[in-house]
Amino acid sequence: MKNKITTVFIITSIVFAGTALATVLTTNPTTKNLLLGSKAAVSTTTAPKTANASALNTVLEATEHAIAYDLASAISRALGLEVGGDEISALKARNMGYGEITLAYNLAQASGKSVNEILEMRYEQKMGWGNIAKTLGVKLHDKADKSAVILREVRLDNDADNFLASLRIDLDAEDNDNAHGNHHKHAVDNDNSNDNPAQHKNEGNGNGYGNGNGNGNGNGHGKH
């Protein structure tokens, strides 16, 4: 009788342990490796990672959306333009930085051009910001500083700093390109002037006039 009770107790314990193990495996998807003895019995599940990544993307999208609308409002107030958050989001989707976006609106407002016209000069015609401002007759540094102020208003301080730093690099590159182009043009002009045959023209014409009494006096005139 005692042995029978012991056997029943062991079987009940095994069943209870199995039920508990099954519960752990089905309700805890974050379990990595459940060891039975010295071998791994359960592999790592990736379901929580996927869920976490999706949740993170949702948070990032919401943050970007909020920033776009805050920046649109700040630009509207500072420049007296009607700018929507969707416009900012669309430009950001084109891999533009918030600094470039803000500068484009500043240049558009100062020149009477549309933002699309400014961006066409930048990305279609491959013009640097310095050359764009020069073409528009706008002082770039003033508009760049104003753009940085707008960015800082919506707490985009890092974007403002990075924007000003990249703008300095852009302007240095433009200066080098312009200097190289002017040097090349000067060299070509010099080559053309050296090859101009008009500058090497040397023609001489002589006319002699003599009185025929056996004595001839000749006067020669040479034209150079």
Image (cartoon, rainbow, N blue to C red):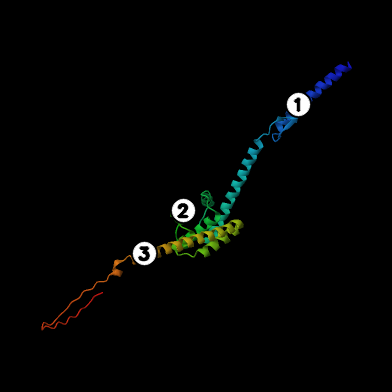
Residue at figure coordinates x 86%, y 18% from the top left? 5
Residue 107's disc number: none
Q: What residue type is labelled 2?
A: Tyr
Left or right of 18, for residue 116: left
Give how far apart the Cα atoms at labels 3 and 2 are.
35 Å
Residue 167's x, y, as percent? 53, 59
The 10 Å Cα crowd at callout 3, few under 14, some 14 to 19, many 20 or more, is few
Relative height, residue 14 to residue 176 (above, below): above
Q: What residue type is labelled 1?
A: Thr
Residue at figure coordinates x 29%, y 66% from the top left? 197
Q: In which quarter of the image is residue 164?
A: bottom right
Q: In which quarter of the image is residue 28?
A: top right
Q: What residue type is labelled 3?
A: Asp
Element under label 1? helix
Element under label 3? helix
Residue 123's disc number: 2
Q: Quadrant of residue 111?
A: bottom left
* Mark toward the viewer: 3 or 2: 3
Q: Which of 42 and 194 is in front in this view?
A: 194
